[in-house]
Amino acid sequence: MPFEKFEDAEAIDDERRKAIASSIRIISVEELKKLGEEIFDSPDRPWRQTFLSVVTENPGATFYHASAGEGVIVLYSRDDDKGLWYLPGSGIGPLSEGGRQLMRKAIAAGPHR
């Protein structure tokens, strides 16, 4: 039966919170641009323009990179409270309010590598 393997949503959230807290780090603009080229390998890729505008319009901003576990990468800018999640080879999307809140808490907890 497909529902036999039930996942506990709270346990998943706790695992993601721990993964983010242990992996969050400041990412340089150069590294962010390079990662952006990997993520947005085609000019018509959704979210490409949004990503590029956040990076180019905020050259002095501090950007953060974290792993949420299971291959999910999170990129976040606290300066304008925007972020995205990325699962290589699978999907990409804007970071939800809950995701941004997790990032803000991890940043506040510091320190960052």
Image (cartoon, rainbow, N blue to C red):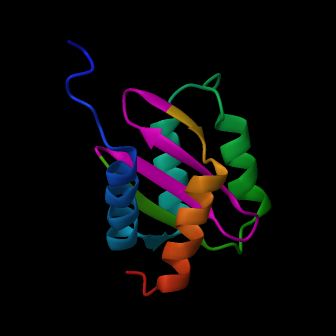
**Which residue appears farthest toward the right when viewing the image?**
57
Q: Nearer the viewer, residue 95 or 31?
A: 95
Q: Identify the image quadrant of residue 46.
A: top right
Query: In the rendered view, would you say 82 is above or below 94?
Result: below
Image quarter in which the C terminus is found: bottom left
Residue 90 forms part of the magenta stretch: yes
Q: In terms of depth relative to the viewer, which is nearer, 19 or 10? A: 10
Q: Position of residue 99 (x, y in %)?
A: 56, 54
* The N terminus - image quarter: top left
Residue 27's spot in the image, x, y percent? 49, 68
Residue found at the very far top of the displayed protein? 1
The residue lying toward the viewer, choosing from 29 and 54, is 54
The answer to if 68 sits in the magenta stretch is no
The answer to whether residue 46 is left or right of residue 32 is right
| For residue 35, side relative to residue 93 (left or right) | left
Instruction: Please determine whether, in this image, residue 37 is positioned above or below residue 65.
Output: above
Where residue 35 sits in the image (x, y, percent)?
46, 49
Q: Residue at x 47, y 61 (%)?
A: 31
Task: Count the labels in the image.
Answer: 0
**Displayed quadrant of residue 103:** bottom right
**In the picture provided, is 94 more to the left or to the right than 58?**
left
Q: Nearer the viewer, residue 53 or 83?
A: 83
Residue at image coords 52%, 69%: 28
Q: Residue at x 73, y 71 (%)?
A: 79
Q: Is residue 40 placed above or below 30 in the rendered structure? A: above
Task: Give me the residue at 55% from left, 25% from top.
Answer: 42
Q: Which residues are magenta?
A: 70-91
In the current view of this chain or complex, which residue is farthest to the bottom? 111
